[in-house]
Amino acid sequence: MSLSPSDAPSPSPSPAHPRFAQALADLGLTVPVRSFPEGTRTAADAAAAIGCELAQIVKSLIFTAWGSPLSDQGRELGGGVPVLVLMDGASRVDVQRVRAELQATKVTRADAALVRETTGYAIGGVPPFGHRVRTRVLADRGLLAHDEVWAAAGTPHTVFPLAPTTLIEHAQGRVVDVRERSS
């Protein structure tokens, strides 16, 4: 007995956020998206769920820059320009280094409303690309220390793996040194 096309099982939908799933399709990327009901909202949660090193988790963090040459090139929200920083999960962003990279007078962490307005995603689920608003992307060089990194797939419960060079390329990021240095 053969199945007619209408009887054939349909592929299961991706657990990724629909906007991010569309971004993957638009880029021609096929990646396994893993879902963890217990959540992967923090880098530590994600590393524990996946079973990888904390540094293999990509944090996608939105900052706001004021007084930057970007102000002439991009959309200002509330007087500042949103900027995405991709950082490994074991490190912290040095805001002064970000400010220097952007030649800005001031850089601050964006609040939850600005993150959602800029990216279309909630904090804890922001992927490195597939955002509502195109932003400048700074990718910390530390991500390149790994063969594979894991990033959010648009929800606080989903992640996907990718080579860091491929991830940075698709995010249209510029590799920089913006991590805090230990004393």
Image: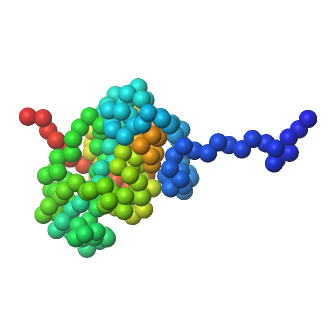
Quick one: quadrant of the N terminus?
Answer: top right
Residue drawn at 26 percent across, 57 percent down? 110
- Color scheme of the displayed model: rainbow
User: Horizontal and vertical percent for residue 57?
Assistant: 35, 37
Task: Tell me residue 143's x, y (percent).
Answer: 31, 39
Residue farthest to the bottom, as pictured: 72
- Residue 24 lies, in percent from the top left, at 52, 51
- Seen at 45% across and 56% down, the residue is 130
The residue at the far top in this view is 51
Q: In which quarter of the image is residue 124?
A: top left
The answer to which of 49 and 163 lies nearer the viewer is 49
Where residue 138 appears, as percent x and y from the top left, is 29, 52
Where residue 2 sits, quadrant-wise, is: top right
Q: Is residue 128 visible?
A: no
Q: Is residue 125 above or below residue 68?
A: above
Location of residue 142 with respect to 23 vertically, above or below: above
Which one is in front, 69 or 123? 123
In the picture, the quarter occupied by the C terminus is top left
Name the residue located 44 percent from the left edge and 46 percent from the top edge: 155
**Along the line of sight, which residue is nearer the eye, 88 or 110?**
110
Residue 24 or 16: which is nearer the viewer? 16
- Of all residues, the one furthest to the left in this rendering is 183
Q: Is residue 80 visible from the viewing direction of this image? A: yes
Q: In this view, does 151 lie to the left or right of 19?
A: left
